[in-house]
């Protein structure tokens, strides 16, 4: 692990992380298909509004990074329209499609000046494969660590945020050993695992398996049109119209996961689950749930 | 509640309850479409074998009750074939389609002589609406209570077994208040809530809501080709190739469910979840998980 990445973990970031569960069928199984109708969900629930209110409102300068998608132009234009409807006039699109593209110093300069970035949906492995280890990503990480800078991501863009990233795993096979594939994510935050499209795609099993295989990680299952705002790398607030599930594996008493052959069903005793609605808080390091925003850690 | 039903709850049943999560797309949303290919799952995982081994093996006399289905002849014939492949030669079909049909004393005589019954999938509300309060059902309940009698049910046939029965609730809206519809089931067992097709249909939310609204009930989420064998109304063993999820709400610390308007998202703090694989045991009354069958309650 490069020194600067390790260093990042040691300090409380000044930036804000916003992870969104996705709003339409655009995860890793299928490519994104943004449609205006589906986008309206974002407005209704105020997720995009919340993103800009964490920056400078409608005057915010946001760079939309479309790397996860294989149809970046289409996806990007829809973000321009969606933010535009809210009155935003300073939205840039960064279409990094290859590691070569990522070397373009123009992009580096732009993220140095932006108030925040938005990682679109698509395939989270594209994000790590194309951006992992680049100066472009280091600049974003430095800004997240040291500035009042917002890193937002939806679907694949959310799943890649942690250092532990699920990149594959069907709903049906999700509780068979080895069916959930995990690798190293971008690492804006550690000791959590994000999953997206959580409720509608039946992803309980894959996040449970990911948490059971290392209970140090808190599982965060993001519903569609639903997200979390994380401040100080710890204080997580649920936003949007749906639900966020928290899986805390610290009290797991038994799991057969280490003893199984690949493909055998796993068992887990005593997984703690919290269901968060809009406004609920969860403090990741303390592993504490608060039902409202007036919560103060005592 | 009629006296005899109440009485049933007071004593430990001598019979065995086998609840199966369904093996194909035949829940309440769609009508059953049994296909030979899908049926093979039952053989592979041994669920049907287990059902007959809980009776008298291949000589067992089993009555298949197709009431939940609106295509009972097709469904019934597939069970004849499926049990037939195992060598069973004494399988009857009871096609009760209306409350009038249920008055047929021939059916009453047949279930008095059978070693067990199998409720097929379909719509669980058909089971309660057509069979609820009939002498036919009382005979089955008496036999379950007082004899070494097996009551098996798959999908809708499993969901109707408890006194608390989910009969509707989409995966997408399952964590919005009021989206999960519950009514009184047949009542072979109480203080549990069965859900079926659990993993593939993303039904985490609806079972969580059902449990949160009354944490006295243990939620049992049955995967496909997966089931539980319950003895003494308490000792539950996981069978089949998939997973069974147990939701224990007794340690829920906060839920907003009583305060919400209809359609608002619910929140739940501290739901205990167990993931059971084949061979794991869970004792319902003690709410204890055992990872193997050698478990003895001390």
Image: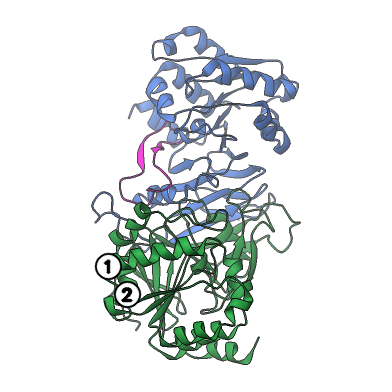
Chain colours: A blue, B green
- Under circle 2, the secondary element is helix
| Image quadrant containing the C terminus of chain B | bottom left
User: Which quadrant of the figure has residue A118?
Assistant: top right
Residue with the mark numbered 1:
B86
Question: Which numbered dot is residue B20?
Answer: none
Q: Which of B83 and A203 is in front in this view?
A: B83
State how far apart marks 1 and 2 are (Cα): 9 Å
* B125 sits left or right of A88 in the view: left
Which chain's residue wears label 2? B
Magenta-colored segment: predominant secondary structure: loop
Region rendered in magenta: A162-187
Instruction: Give the mark, 1 or 2, whose residue is nearer the N terminus.
Output: 2
Residue A168 in picture, x, y percent from top left: 39, 38
The residue drawn where x is 35% and y is 40% is A181
Q: Which of marks 1 and 2 is in front?
A: 1
The answer to whether mark 1 and mark 2 are in CB contact below 8 A is yes
Q: Is residue A93 visible?
A: yes
Q: Do labels 1 and 2 share a chain?
A: yes
Up-down relation of residue B263 to residue A59 (above or below)? below
- Under circle 1, the secondary element is loop
Residue with the mark numbered 2:
B52
Q: Which of A261 and A229 is in front in this view?
A: A261
The residue drawn where x is 34% and y is 26% is A2
């Amino acid at each position: 692990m490069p020194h600067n990445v390790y260093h990042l973990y040691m300090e409380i970031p000044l930036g804000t992380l916003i992870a969104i569960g996705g709003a339409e069928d655009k995860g890793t199984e299928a490519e994104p298909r943004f449609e205006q109708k589906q986008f309206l969900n974002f407005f209704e629930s105020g997720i995009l509004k919340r993103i800009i209110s964490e920056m400078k409102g409608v005057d915010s300068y946001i760079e939309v990074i479309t790397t996860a998608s294989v149809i970046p132009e289409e996806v990007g234009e829809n973000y321009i329209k969606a933010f535009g409807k809210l009155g935003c006039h300073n939205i840039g699109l960064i279409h990094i499609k290859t590691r070569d593209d990522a070397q373009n110093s123009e992009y580096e300069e732009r993220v140095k000046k932006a108030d925040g970035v938005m990682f679109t949906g698509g395939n989270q492995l594209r994000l790590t494969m194309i951006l992992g280890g680049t100066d472009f990503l280091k600049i974003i990480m430095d800004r997240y660590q040291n500035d009042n800078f917002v890193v937002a991501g939806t679907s694949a863009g959310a799943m890649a945020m942690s250092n532990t990233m699920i990149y594959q795993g069907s709903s049906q096979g999700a509780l068979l050993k080895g069916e959930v594939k995990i690798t190293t994510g971008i690492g804006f935050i550690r000791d959590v695992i994000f999953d997206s499209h959580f409720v509608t795609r039946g992803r309980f099993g894959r996040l449970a398996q990911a948490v059971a295989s290392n209970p140090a990680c808190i599982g965060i299952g993001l519903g569609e049109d639903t997200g979390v705002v994380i401040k100080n790398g710890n204080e997580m607030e649920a936003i949007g119209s749906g639900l966020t599930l928290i899986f805390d594996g610290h009290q797991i008493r038994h799991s057969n996961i280490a003893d199984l052959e690949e493909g055998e069903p796993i068992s887990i005793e005593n997984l703690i689950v919290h269901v968060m609605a809009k406004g609920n808080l969860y403090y990741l390091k303390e592993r504490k749930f608060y039902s409202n925003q007036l919560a103060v850690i005592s």
